[in-house]
Image: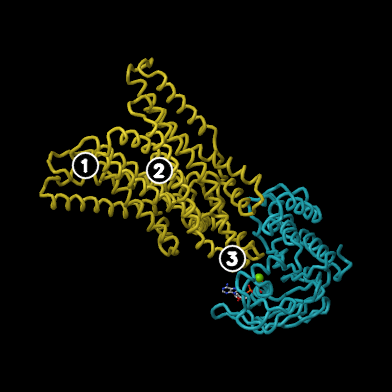
Chain colours: A cyan, B yellow
Amino acid sequence: MLEARALRKAFGRTTALDGVSAEIGEGEIIAITGPSGSGKSTLLHCLAGIIRPEAGEVRLDGRRVDTLDEDDRTRLRRENFGIVFQFGQLVPELSAVENVALPLLFNRHGRRESLRTARSWLERLDTADCADHLPGELSGGQLQRVAVARALAVGPRVVFADEPTGALDSLAGEQVMDTLVGTARESRTTLVIVTHDNRVAAYADREIVLRDGTVAGASTVGTSTAGAPAAGAPAAGGEATT
Amino acid sequence: MITVIRMPVRGRSAPERARARLMSVGAALATFLLCAAVTLVSFRIDTPDDRLWMFTEREPRLVVALTLALLVVPAAVFTYQASRLATATRERRLAALRLAGATPYETRLIGAYEAGRQALLGGSLGGVAHLAVNVVLWWSLDGVVPLLSPVWTLAALAAVVLAEVWSGLAAGRHVVASPLGLVRRARLRGPRAVDLLLVALGVALLAAGLIGKGRFPVLGKYGAALSMTAGMVLLLFGLVLAATWLIRAVARRAGRVTAAPETLLAARIVQADPRAWARALTVVGLTVFFGSGIGAQQGNVLLRTGLQPPYLTAYLLIDLALLLALVTSAAALVVHQAEELLDHRRSFAALAASGVPATALGRVLTRQALIAASPVCVVAAVAGAGLVILTGADAPGWSPGAFAFTAVRAAVMAGIGVLAAVLVARASRRILREALRPEELRTG
Ligand SMILES: Nc1ncnc2c1ncn2[C@@H]1O[C@H](COP(=O)(O)OP(=O)(O)OP(=O)(O)O)[C@@H](O)[C@H]1O
Ligand SMILES: [Mg+2]
């Protein structure tokens, strides 16, 4: 469904991506891993249409994404994608439920309906009692679950997550991953997660390993060519997380 | 210690250099205006030359001097806002100094040192400019205007520098740089009840003066005038402070009912920090207040006496001064919006990444300006016009025409105030575009 071919992207003299190709199927859960600076975030940004690669192609359902102008890519992201970052994505002045309702409101849903939908998503992610708190009053794990709710609330086809648990301890990180992966599987949403945490990568069906801007290996979890053992991680695969 | 204090001045970033330069400009403006006002009060010349009415006629001279002195207020506010530019960078540096063992007081001295330095630089320029204008006038008018001694200029310069050093010291209070190198802004203070008390007291004194005209219990016939003046001053201060309440109430109301995400965002952001908006809008509000008040007075006088040249010139000059005040206050608003965008760049960039168009986020800026500026400008216009009508309604010549003129002028002033704020917000979209770059999303 989502396809990248021979992507190249350089920032000044650093080449962040140097001929990366990847193919992601409907409902798949993919982990992009690799050492720091290997181009993981850059690849995610290209796939999500946030930035344009200098060479190569990105296609969604066979339709070119990278050649669209900023307006069309913005519309494409709004209609198809949900995005979760490591931190700082919630508007500090809006309550949790308002933050989740925001993309719905931008999609021209009514106020009542948006807030109701937002509240039910917060309930699904076990954060109903955070609904009326400001982000500053929530813990890191709660914040990330609210962010996940916001990404999922619009019913996206693909959710992109860049180090969604990077700022959390392992227990809070596990909770966030459980809910993110669980809901993605339930709704057959495609999930692309950037991480350098093996335990997070273990949730994925498949892993794309980057090194110095190239694909160093692709694997199904547990047999990673990057030598990342999935030991100790929650069981990978579909039914383990609900 | 001096070396430590001076250290941060070297190796400043571009925004920090811009801040320093803007602070100097503000200080130069303030010094120049102060000098000019003092000059106009301090001497009077006798000449048949009509062009010099400003120096010969007593009343226009005082009006112009007062206007110039009042213009120092926007210049000061502008300087203060400029001093807040790029504070994030400075705060990080202060935190690093704390880490190296500097006491909180010493880190505050750094702010005071920078403020004093820029004030001295800019103030000297303003003073020299004032003296130069004096010399040119003296020379081109064959000595009718006397050469001034530089004493007043030096006094004005000293006043400006002292004021800025003090504000530099005070500004540091809000930043608590912990010895662990963390920077944390002290809790934002909400509106206080005292602000409303001032308004109430002002209204009470004003009413007492009005009702007791002629038979005021204390101070004989001056009592009423004194009470009214004091009431007016208190009311003015109170209104400036109460703007915080007003802005927050309007923002809360807007946020509670709207279905437009832009308005929701704008309202909540304004609601979270109404003091910052009130501060940034102070001069806009004062301009609208004076503009409407003077409009009421103009309406009365002009309709009674016809278009007399000296009045017309004085009024034109005042309007020009008001315009200048508005432009300076608009600059203060730009600084405020830039600061706010800097605070929101991460969450806004995340919204843009998930498909919220930049134009929609631009609308958030203009709606913030609308939400904050409309109530302030409307109240200021009504208060300004109302005050003049109330205090002078029994004076001769308040015709229906004068009332109509007053109402139109007040509405126009309010409109201009709101328009200025909205235009500034539109101009800030350029800064917004910078803030939305995907680079803001990079972790680390
Ligand atoms: N906006 C930018 N300007 C300059 N260089 C950049 C920019 N974005 C990325 N780079 C460079 O591109 C390379 C890849 O960056 P990227 O953020 O994709 O790495 P990453 O794998 O996500 O690393 P991390 O795990 O640390 O987040 C790095 O060398 C980085 O310095
Ligand atoms: Mg990264």
Q: How many discs appear?
A: 3
Judging depth in this view, the residue of B407 and B30 nearest the camera is B407
Q: Give the structural element (helix, strand or loop) at label 1.
A: helix
Percent position (x, y) of residue B378?
Answer: 49, 40
Q: Earlier in the sequence, mark 3 or mark 1?
A: 1
Residue at numbered disc 2: B287
> In the rendered view of the protein, which quadrant contains the C terminus of chain B?
bottom right
Left or right: residue B18 versus residue A210 is: left
Chain bearing tag 2 is B
Task: Kindly identify the amino acid type of the residue bearing the numbered disc 1.
Answer: Met
Note whether residue B265 is visible: yes
**Residue extending furthest left?**
B142
Asked whether the residues under marks 3 and 1 belong to the same chain, the reply is: yes
Q: Residue at x 35, y 17 (%)?
A: B214
Q: CA distance from mark 3 to mark 1?
A: 55 Å
Note whether residue B68 is visible: no
Chain bearing tag 3 is B
Q: Earlier in the sequence, mark 2 or mark 1?
A: 1
Q: Give the structural element (helix, strand or loop) at label 3.
A: helix
Task: Kindly identify the amino acid type of the residue bearing the numbered disc 3.
Answer: Glu
Q: Based on the displayed image, in which of its 4 quarters is residue A73 positioned?
A: bottom right
Chain bearing tag 1 is B
- Placement of A64 over or under B110, stated as above or below: below
- Placement of B39 over or under B395, stated as above or below: below
Q: Residues within 10 Å of mark 2 (few under 14, many from 20)?
A: many
Residue at numbered disc 3: B440
Task: Kindly identify the amino acid type of the residue bearing the numbered disc 2.
Answer: Thr
Percent position (x, y) of residue B185?
Answer: 55, 49
Q: Residue at x 41, y 54 (%)?
A: B1
Percent position (x, y) of residue B226?
Answer: 36, 24
Percent position (x, y) of residue B308?
Answer: 24, 39
Figure quadrant, ligand 2 = bottom right
